[in-house]
Every structure is written in structure tokens, then in C-alpha cells.
Image (cartoon, grey):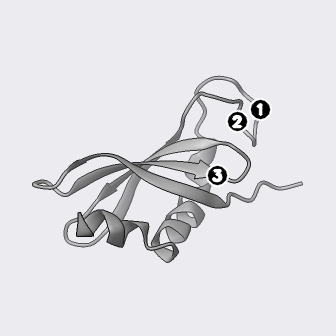
Amino acid sequence: MSYRPIVENVTEASSNQKDGLYEFIVKMVDGTKCRVFYHRYPEWKLTNISRLLQSPCPICRKDFICKCMDNFAGDIGQQIVDGQYLDKAEAK
């Protein structure tokens, strides 16, 4: 069975509006949490994603650092855009 990330909630963890850097905590439906970094200039671009080590990786089941979420950065990034979470961060 292949993993399909589904974004449940996105909260802004920190931002540097001067430089256009934003950090979000993304909670998935399966309980996995990821830290996602965006750069805003010249347009929104996902620069890095990493899984928070609160539960084992849903893909490889490792309980330590892995790069599995990098494979799903495009899907997760698109769900963040579709959910208009970036627009909410920009409005602050």
C-alpha cells in the first residue's frame, strides 16, 4: 500500500517577513507532523520539508531522521496552496 499524504491543518510556526521566509507546522490526517519552509520572493516556493520526530515515519517506519517526506513535497505543497494557507500567512 502506498502512502498518500493528506494535509489536515497548517499553522505558522515562525516568519521573517523582511526576507520572506516562513516556517509552517503541517499536521497530516494520519497524525504525522512535518515542518515546512517556504520562501516568498519572487513567489511562494517550498524550500524544505522535514518530519517532526514525534511518531515513526509512515513510509519507512523509522523512528529517527529520514528523507521520505521529500518525495511528497510536491503533493503536500499543492495541498497547502489549495487550502489557501499561504494566503492566510501573507495577510498577517
Q: Which of 90 and 36 is in front in this view?
A: 90
- Residue drawn at x 42%, y 66% is 85
- Residue drawn at x 23%, y 63% is 92
N-terminal of the pair, mark 3 or mark 2, is 3
Find disc 3 in the rendering and name its residue.
28
Residue kind at label 2, given as amino acid type: Cys
- Residue 67 shown left or right of residue 10 in the figure: right
Residue kind at label 3, given as amino acid type: Met
Residue 72, above or below 25: below
- Residue 57 shown left or right of residue 92 in the figure: right
Find disc 2 in the rendering and name its residue.
57
Crowd rating for badge 2 (residues with CA inside 10 Å; few <14, some 14–19, many 20+) = many
Image disc number at residue 61 = 1
Find out whether the residues at labels 1 and 3 contact each other: C-beta distance under 8 Å: no
Residue 2 picture location, percent across and down: 83, 56
As helix, strand or loop, the secondary structure at mark 2 comes to: loop
- Residue drawn at x 74%, y 48% is 30
Residue 45, above or below 65: below
C-alpha distance separating marks 1 and 3: 16 Å
